[in-house]
Image: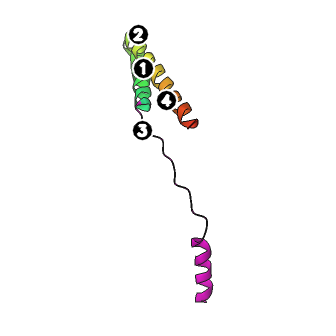
Amino acid sequence: MSEQNEERDKEIVGGAKPLPERLPPPTVWPATLALGATLLAFGVVTSWIMSAVGLGLFLLGAGGWFEDLRHDQFE
């Protein structure tokens, strides 16, 4: 009985080695995008100037984040 368990454990443990995961480097773009969305929504109830600043930050954050993703894809 124990021989069967040992053989089964060898099959499970003896599989192919997984490759290490490659994590993307941390960036500021997701926080910029979130701040822009927050200011944009807050500007709807306060003033159009706040909305304009929020829209600018939102576009800047989205553009920067997409550029980082595109750059990481080609590496």
| Residue 48 position by quadrant | top left
Horizontal arrangement in the rendering, residue 35 relative to residue 73 (left or right): left
Amino acid marked by disc 3: Pro
Q: Determine contact: label 2, label 3, CB under 8 Å.
A: no
Camera-nearest label, 2 or 1: 1
Q: Residue under label 3, please give it.
A: 26
Camera-nearest label, 4 or 2: 4
Q: Give the range drawn in magenta.
A: 1-28
Residue 64 highlighted magenta (yes or no): no
Q: Determine contact: label 4, label 2, CB under 8 Å.
A: no
Camera-nearest label, 3 or 1: 3
Camera-nearest label, 2 or 3: 3
CA gap, disc 4 to disc 3?
Answer: 11 Å
Residue at the location (45% across, 25% down)?
A: 61
x, y percentage for residue 52? Answer: 42, 12
CA gap, disc 2 to disc 1?
Answer: 14 Å
x, y percentage for residue 35? Answer: 39, 26
Residue 10 highlighted magenta (yes or no): yes
Q: Earlier in the sequence, mark 2 or mark 3?
A: 3
Q: Residue under label 4, please give it.
A: 65
Instruction: Say few, some or many: other residues with alpha carbon within 10 Å of mark 3 (under 14 / 14 to 19 / 20 or more).
Output: few
Tag 3 secondary structure: loop
Q: Residue under label 2, please give it.
A: 48
CA gap, disc 4 to disc 1?
Answer: 12 Å
Q: Residue under label 1, please give it.
A: 57
The quadrant of the image that shows the N terminus is bottom right
Residue at the location (42% across, 15% down)?
A: 44
On screen, residue 61 above or below 6? above
Q: Earlier in the sequence, mark 4 or mark 2?
A: 2
Tag 1 secondary structure: helix
